[in-house]
Amino acid sequence: MRVWLDNTGVQSAALCLSGQGRSESDIKSLLQLATLIAFSDSLLVNGFEVPEVARRTAEISHNLAALGLDESAFCIQAETEDSFAAACAEAADGAAEDLPYVFRPAEPTAGDVLPPLLSPAMRATQAAFPDALAAEPSGQVLRELRVEALGRKSAGAVQIMLAESAELRRAVREVRSAFSPFSESCAEQLSGALRCFLNETLAARHSASYVPAVARAELVRRESTAAIAAVERALGQVVEDLTPKPLSVPPIASYLIQKARGDPKGIIQEAIALREKTADVRAWLGRRLRSSERDYSKYVHELLSSTEALRDLVRRELRLDKRALLTDGIELQLVLGVPTASLSASVLRTWVKSRVSHGRIAILTDVSKVAAYPADPFALQKLRSKCLEAAS
């Protein structure tokens, strides 16, 4: 499973590794990144960025490798001017149709929807909506806007999208009118939402699934990749059966926090260690989903049945459900009047299947147990303190 991340989410997570986290949103970003490291085959980010953003992401890639992540697992994807402009044009069409229905700005925002640590000038550039677009501009104005914006690389993405699509320009004017007065915060959130549409297009072009930054996901009502979210839900149901106490974070994140004892860098290291143990799960899910990925309804059905099967296997392993035992298949039959033991073929198949599955779901069993029975009840508080150290 290939996952496309935006630089905003990656850089938000990285702040926690140096104790410079600003809010709960950055901590969620760290846990999101760690979960994706553990359950994805590779992580991709856009490399067509302004120098300050590109430099910071390159540093993060180096730091992840220093913590033990294979360099091939985190890829900075190069884009040309032509490929990036084409992606902007394609994304603009989808955004024009959906934006009025999904964009709901919040005051205050749940987190930063633009890359952290940007200079004030760069923040203003990323969230700029040119005055020339207040009314429908001429073709010459649009061509000049497009060329100028493309020179700013990803920082000019929103302006490129607007220059490419009359429908998107109309949709943006409607949104700005609906949320009048349109504050600076609203402009940043609208920029973040449009960048979600662009990243979704870039992801599809690289055969990946897009997972938006935590703060951006709330703007457009998106969640993690469907497959990882389904695994999270399945394990959550198991944990609920193990303990009546509700978890404050998803089970995989809870497992990583406990294993790392609340240390931010330790969470990444534990995610890398978990990654080595989830290879069978990832391969199994990939095989089950690959044949149905072009038909969304079939994909969802296969995903639900696959993760329900994983959940049931974990439940049996934890003895929440009856396990398949070889002795269950022994039947007494009369052979020439003498009681003789034989083995039921159907039960034998079930038993063999359960033994084959044992190795695959062993790590999921461990995740469920650690999440349900935390050894360190203060691990999450420790994580918050260490992530937000500079802010306290």
Image (spheres, rainbow, N blue to C red):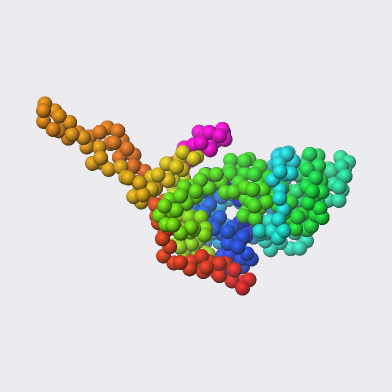
Quarter of the image where the C terminus is located: bottom right
In the rendered image, residue 129, in percent from the top left (x then y), is placed at 81, 51
**Residue farthest to the bottom, as pictured:** 392
Residue at x 67% of width, y 48% of height? 220
In the rendered image, residue 65, in percent from the top left (x then y), is placed at 53, 58
**Residue farthest to the front, as pictured:** 244
User: Is 117 placed left or right of 146 in the picture?
Assistant: left
Residue at x 56% of width, y 34% of height? 297
Residue at x 81% of width, y 42% of height? 170
Q: Which residues are magenta?
A: 284-302
Number of residue marks: 0
- Residue 67 vertical placement versus 385 (above, below): above
In the rendered image, residue 252, in percent from the top left (x then y), is placed at 48, 55
User: Is 3 placed left or right of 80 in the picture?
Assistant: left
Q: Is residue 41 visible?
A: no
**Residue 60 is a magenta residue:** no
> Which image quadrant for residue 123?
bottom right
- Residue 343 vertical placement versus 176 (above, below): above
**Residue 285 is a magenta residue:** yes
